[in-house]
Amino acid sequence: MYISEPVARLINELMKLPSIGPRSAQRLAYHIVNIPIEDAAKLARAILDVKEKIHQCRICHNLTDEEVCSICTDEARTTGMVCIVASAKDIPPIEKAKVFRGKYHVLGGVISPLDGIGPDRLNIKSLLARIGTEGINEAIVATDSDTSGEVTALYLAKILSPLDIKVSRLAYGLPMGAALEYADEITISRAIEGRREIGSTPAS
Amino acid sequence: MYISEPVARLINELMKLPSIGPRSAQRLAYHIVNIPIEDAAKLARAILDVKEKIHQCRICHNLTDEEVCSICTDEARTTGMVCIVASAKDIPPIEKAKVFRGKYHVLGGVISPLDGIGPDRLNIKSLLARIGTEGINEAIVATDSDTSGEVTALYLAKILSPLDIKVSRLAYGLPMGAALEYADEITISRAIEGRREIGSTPAS
């Protein structure tokens, strides 16, 4: 044992995080050993706080530390439009693009038969309930452009279209196979402006 | 505010870590939001533990949670040789190479006049004290191959050589300008085996 137990344990915990390999974990651990204790305490406190304070918005399933998230309570936003995303982490990049001013609905995943995830596992009942009560007449499906994202978009189009709702899909600019989470603001602006109705030619 | 305060604060704390940019920090933060609370607590605890339990070894300045580190107390190790490193994080990669079986001495930095770091800021007094008491007759200087590392090695050679100590320097295999921390085991093995005395031709 040439690394003392507390450092080895921190390296081990850091390696559980996504895209942190053994060398990154070691580098981060030695960095943390050397920072002031107040800074380490702030980091530890921030980690615990997100677990203790963050939960799903009662309306849209976005992450929030309130009962209802700041987007759902924002009266300046358009109420007739909803942007449907797979995960809460897809909301910040869309917000940064500053093109969409409606509300959101977080599905909590995408349809993926190989992983045993069917529509019943997604937040679709609450979406239908909102359409009934919030006067929504347009839904933009902003799932990723991979197979699961496309399948989910088609499924949503199928169940929403009979409700006399215009259902569109992010289109222009998003490169196929890329994750929405990493798209830049301009690409997302283009995708929102050029959205097309599902099963039709590009919308004007 | 489309990211709730606890999540934004965690992203902000994560961005203070080395090589974690805004997107990595966001990705890590959303990951932490979704892991079980026990796992988040383990990570937070590990961060606090290294700050509370880890300090410098009284003898060699390696990081340890004891008074004296596990390398200094290991009676199976050669006592006549010391490997001098800039930082405690340089010890694990050398140990992994399994070629060096002596003791270590951590300088706590390298000489860097531009940063105002002179030899007086490094753990050199304690090194000289050890040479007097531990019967050390060979020192391998394993500082990085950059300018500060070379300057530090030359300085150590100058003050140690009059004490009738063979002073060598890691040599073969370490690419110029590369950080020791990221070298692989084979490169480090080659560098230890091919070490050369400072100011001479390669040692046999």
Image (tube, coloured by chain):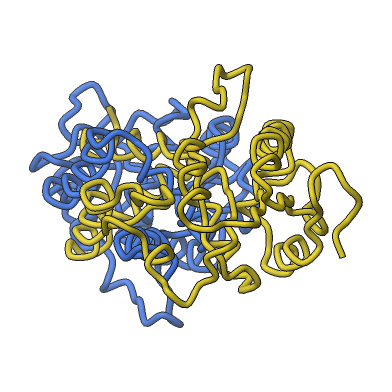
Chain colours: A yellow, B blue
Indicate the position of residue A104 as horizontal and vertical percent values.
52, 56
Residue B179 at x, y = what percent?
54, 53
For the N terminus of chain A, the quadrant is top left
Query: From where the camera sits, is residue B141 visible?
Result: no
Q: Nearer the viewer, residue A183 or A133?
A: A133
Question: Residue visible at 53% across and 31% down?
Answer: B185
Image quadrant where one finds the C terminus of chain A: bottom right
Please tell me which residue is depicted at 21% across the width and 48% down the height of the picture.
A52
Horizontally, residue B126 falls left or right of residue B94, namely left
In the picture, residue B153 is in which quadrant? bottom left
Number of callouts:
0
Residue for point 70% across, 42% down: A161
Of residue B162 and residue B143, the one placed in the foreground of this image is B143
Provide residue A149's location: percent of width, then percent of height: 68, 37
The answer to whether residue B122 of the structure is visible from this angle is yes
Q: For the point 73% across and 69% down, which residue is it?
A: A186
The outermost residue toward the right is A201
Would residue A13 appear left or right of B54 to someone viewing this image? right
| Residue A193 appears left or right of B91 | right
**Residue B72 falls in which quadrant of the image?**
top left
Q: Position of residue B117 (x, y in %)?
A: 35, 76
Q: Residue furthest left?
A: B67
In the rendered image, the vertical position of residue B39 relative to residue A49, given as above or below: above
